[in-house]
Structure formats: C-alpha cells, structure tokens
Amino acid sequence: MPSNTALLFPGQGSHSEGMHEPFGDHPLLRRGIELLGFDPFAGLAEGTRTQQPALFLCSMAQWVSREERHEDPLAAAGHSLGEYAALTAAGAIDFEDAVRLVKARAQAMADAAALQPGGMVAMLGGERDDVDELGSELELSLANDNAPGQIVLSGSLAAVDEAVRRAPSIGCRARKLDVAGAFHSRLMAPAAEALERALDATPVREPSFPVLSNGSTRPFEDIRTELAANLLKPVRWREILLELQARGATGFVECGPGTVLKGLVKRTLRATA
C-alpha cells in the first residue's frame, strides 16, 4: 500500500442486504458471528443492534483481504462506528475484543434510543451558518459535518420534523435518516455511560499508524475516553478529510460496503481545490 494512502471505514448507513456475500465464508465473518452469538446479516432490518456489528465485520473482512498491504498506510479514519474498524486495523484493539465492544456499543445505542426516542435529518445544500442557526433554534445537535453542503442534525422527533418543514426556507433539501435514535446528541448520554464500562474492560494499545478521532480530527491520544465521548460529539468528517490531505494523503481507500465515503472525499476536496 503506498505510503500516501489513507484508509476510510464507513459507519451505520452504509450497510445493505447481502453486503457480506462478496466475502463468502470468510473466517473473520464466521468468528465474528460466533462471538456475537447471533448472525447480524440475517437480521439487518432489526436496526442498530444488528447493523453495526454486521458493518464492522464486513469492513474488517475487506481490510484483511486486501492484497496491497506491504506497508502501513499514512493514516486512517472511521465515520462514527468506523472508528472501531480503523483502530482494529491499526492493531490498537484486538479483533475479538473489538467484536464484543461493537456489540456492546450497538446495544447501548439501541437501548438509549428506546429510552429517549429521537431522529436525524440530513440538511443538503444551503449555507452552514443558516443550518447552525436553525439547529440551535430547534435545540438540535450537530451530529455530522460530512462535506460542504451536507450537515446532519440530531434530536427529538418533533424538532427533526420541524427542521424538515423549515429546510426550504434556508435553501436546503431535508432528508430524514433511517435510524432508530438521535445519535451523536445528548440523548445518547445513557449509551455513552454503558460504552465507558465496556471500554474499561477492553485492552487497548498504541496503533501502528495514526487513526484520527471524530471528535478532535487529530490522532487518538486516549482511545477509551475519546471513543465514549464521541458518541455525544459531532462527526467532523469534512475536517478529518482536510486533515488527512494536509498530512500528505493523496489516495483514499474505503474499506467496507458501498462508496459513501469516496463520494464525501470528492465533494470535500473538490470544494477546497
């Protein structure tokens, strides 16, 4: 792998039915299902609890199957859930520990969503300041800064619906996301607490290459603390891509199903060219 390559690992939303089929009977998938105690690919429609482990396993299977792994990449980053795959690829977390951790995270987020129902809405187009102002007025959290013209807000269902109604007034198209809760908002506080306990029981080590944290856009320093805190913070993906470029990345490899992150790379770096 060229030393100017950055690895990107997708998050929930990149999943799809049959996404595991290209990997056939891959040993990582078999071992992951054994550790989970259920087949997440057979129940993707169930939501967060199955979608996150399934996506993690596909991302790892694609990573270990790559033929161009003669040297470490320049750096890596993962979008929300993708942080766990990125850290596992970098050797900071063992695969089996990561499966257990992703299972705990997914369950904690599903439980928090059931406790305090919420939702998320992508605001497409328009001006960043106008989206921020509307979000603040409606008490919605900035959940994802994905790319220029693509901001995701998170919060109560009523506030999300109101953002959809008012989006045209600020020059945006609104798209409600098919998620169970208000991820990356204060409504995930119970999930962050549960995740802290799971992280405390998980061995971590120094990654073999830098992995950028969603919350800081800088390489992880305190992995356990940052992973728990990032459940409540925005995913600063646009800034992460710019940071990777500033570090010398000229090639970006998406490890996981779909091409969502490749699209965000093109959109972000084209806007700053």
Image (cartoon, rainbow, N blue to C red):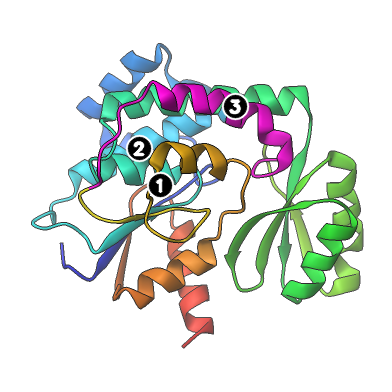
Q: Is residue 72 magenta?
A: no
Please say if the residues under marks 1 and 2 sit with CB atoms less than 8 Å apart. Answer: yes
- Residue placed at 39% from the left, 36% from the top? 56
Q: Secondary structure at mark 3?
A: helix
Residue 123 in view, yes or no: yes
Q: CA distance from mark 3 to mark 1?
A: 30 Å
Q: Position of residue 88 (x, y in %)?
A: 29, 39
Q: Which residue is mark 2?
A: 58
Q: Amino acid at mark 1?
A: Pro
Tell me which corner region of the image, top left, top right, bottom left or bottom right, holds residue 57: top left
Residue 109 in view, yes or no: no
Q: Secondary structure at mark 2?
A: helix
Q: CA distance from mark 1 to mark 2?
A: 7 Å
Mark in front: 3 vs 1: 3
The quarter of the image holding the N terminus is: bottom left
Tell me which corner region of the image, top left, top right, bottom left or bottom right, holds residue 123: bottom right
- Mark 3 vs 2, N-terminal side: 2
First to last magenta residue range: 181-207
